[in-house]
Amino acid sequence: MSTDVSIAAPPSRIRGLSQAAGAMFLVGTLAGVSGVIQDYPVYGGQALRYLLAAAILLAVARLAGLRAVRLTAREGALLTALSLFGLVIFNVCVIEATRHGGPALVGTVLGTVPLALALLGGRPSPRVLGAATVVVAGATLATGLGSGDLPGLMWSLGALFCELCFSLLAIPLLPKLGAVRVSAYSAALAVPLLAVTGLLLDGTAMLRVPTLPEALGLGYQAVIVTTVAFFLWYDALPRIGAATAGLFAGLIPVGAIATGAVLGLGTPSAPDLLGAALVVAGIVIGLSAAGPPATATAAGSPAAGGRQPAAGAGSPAAPASSPATGASGRRSP
């Protein structure tokens, strides 16, 4: 099933490509700070992360003059599902997958995001499929298959599903809400969900006063990995489509490798560098598969709250994919 979410003019497409690359690279840097907060209660820490991110994003929305929007029952359900699967359950799956199989296993499975998005497109071109496969191969090589058991694999597959929900469930919401409000509302909804999970699993021990390194690590997660990366990603999706944006998910391990090198956590190995090169090559191949400009049919800049584009503005066809779309009148986490 196709989701031709937004068809943008070339300048907007270039912006979308840059934002998608930046968002996924920033997500990859998360690995560099994860060791700093590994002793802090997981669910309480993540609740604090999203609370701070939501406060920042809501303040940005207010300064930008973006008023609260009344949601329909369907939109409210989509937003709740986005927060539940794309943020809360995703974190649970990654945590449990890491405990069973280590970060390499879940990283390798998440590296298949580009291929999954290409397949969800319904009829991906051979070049798009080939590009996604190259990206997956590069991400797998850079991450390393590692070792794990069946529960670890199942948790990793759950994380993959939630990662797809993070993008696909947002697509029908972006034209109306825009990138800032989708990011803010989903982060705000994640706070009580994570707090309840933390209370059930950790009790009152879910929160404590963080050390300075832990506070800095949680702050980095909230400001950079959540506030900045969420906005970049959600602003990019309507500009280039989910399938094209998905190619940049291969930059997650590249971001992790670069962060590790900068922080002195390890020198990239030959497989790391070769995997990064394959990811870049796959992205280039995928972008070269974009079709000719088509007629704009969807909402305009999500950053502007979903305003319509100027009449007659052409754009390259964005090979988006999703099981739920609303931007083009079709259902798209």
Image (cartoon, rainbow, N blue to C red):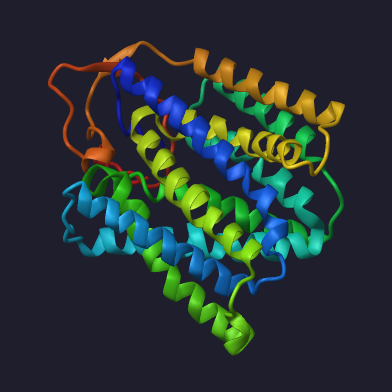
Quarter of the image for residue 24 reads top right
- The answer to whether 73 appears left or right of 270 in the picture is left
Quarter of the image for residue 96 reads bottom right
- The answer to whether 327 appears left or right of 228 in the picture is left
- For the image, the number of numbered tags is 0
Q: What residue is shown at x 57% (from left), y 86% (from top)? A: 200
- The answer to whether 87 appears left or right of 43 in the picture is left
**Residue 155: where, in percent of width, then height?**
69, 61
**Residue 7: where, in percent of width, then height?**
30, 25
Q: Vertically, is 174 above or below 41?
A: above
Residues 332 and 59: in front is 59
Residues 235 and 246: in front is 235
Asked if residue 6 shows in the view, the reply is yes
Q: Vertically, is 167 above or below 133?
A: below
Q: What residue is shown at x 46% (from left), y 26% (from top)? A: 18
Quadrant of the drawing holding the N terminus: top left
**Residue 83: where, in percent of width, then height?**
43, 61
Asked if residue 151 shows in the view, the reply is no
Q: Vertically, is 179 above or below 244?
A: below
View extreme (bottom): residue: 204
View extreme (left): residue: 311
Q: What residue is shown at x 49% (from left), y 69% (from top)? A: 48
Residues 117 and 17: in front is 17
View extreme (front): residue: 212
**Residue 145: where, in percent of width, then height?**
82, 43
